[in-house]
Amino acid sequence: MKITLTILIVLILAVLACGCTAITPSTTQSATLPQVSYNTAIPNLTGTWTGTMQGYEQNTGFSDYPNQTMTVFVTGQQGRILSGHYIWTSNGTVVTEGFAGVIGADGRTLTTAEENEGYSSGSILSGNEIELIWHHAGADYSVAIDSLKRV
């Protein structure tokens, strides 16, 4: 009995000693988030890009836009920020529309906002090929895939 009581007391003291010597985690958090460093080269997209379109429009349905070409002129780039304009033909009329864009931190994604309510998101497939997915919400909703190559 005396040995059992001694073992029990030693075990209790060992548990208490382990608990008292444990490191308590800090409860305070940093007020700022750490800076993430991306080691990805920023591609230079300035220049002329041209290609085909496929899409869907609410009032007309699916289309591969026959005899139409989309041309994108990236006229300015500062780091990951772009500017330029799109040109395409719509119902026999040449349409020019300005845009601003951003290259994702991964160096492979691309997002643009157009002058007249359209947005595109896409991928930089290579140094000379990009794909943009255009979308327009609202009463005349539509989407398109623009497959573009650098000229």
Image (cartoon, helix red, strand yellow):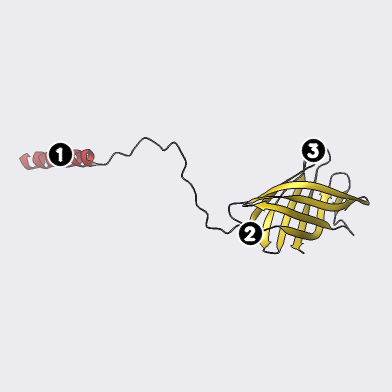
Is the C terminus in the top left, top right, bottom left or bottom right quadrant? bottom right
Instruction: Classify 151 as above or below 5.
Output: below
Badge 1 amino acid: Leu
Tell me: 18 left or right of 86.
left
Q: Indicate which disc residue 13 carries.
A: 1
Badge 3 amino acid: Gly
Q: Indicate which disc residue 138 carries.
A: 3
Residue 58 location, x and y as percent?
84, 44
Instruction: Classify 40 as above or below 142.
Output: below
Q: Indicate which disc residue 87 carries.
A: none
Under circle 3, the secondary element is loop
Viewer-nearest residue: 31 or 121: 31
Tell me: 20 left or right of 125.
left
Residue projecting furthest to the left: 2
Q: Indicate which disc residue 43 carries.
A: 2
Which numbered disc, 1 or 2, marks the residue closer to the eye? 2
Under circle 2, the secondary element is loop
Viewer-nearest residue: 85 or 59: 85
Q: How many marks?
A: 3
Please tell me which of labels 3 and 1 falls first in the chain. Answer: 1
Is the N terminus in the top left, top right, bottom left or bottom right quadrant? top left
Residue 25: quarter of image: top left
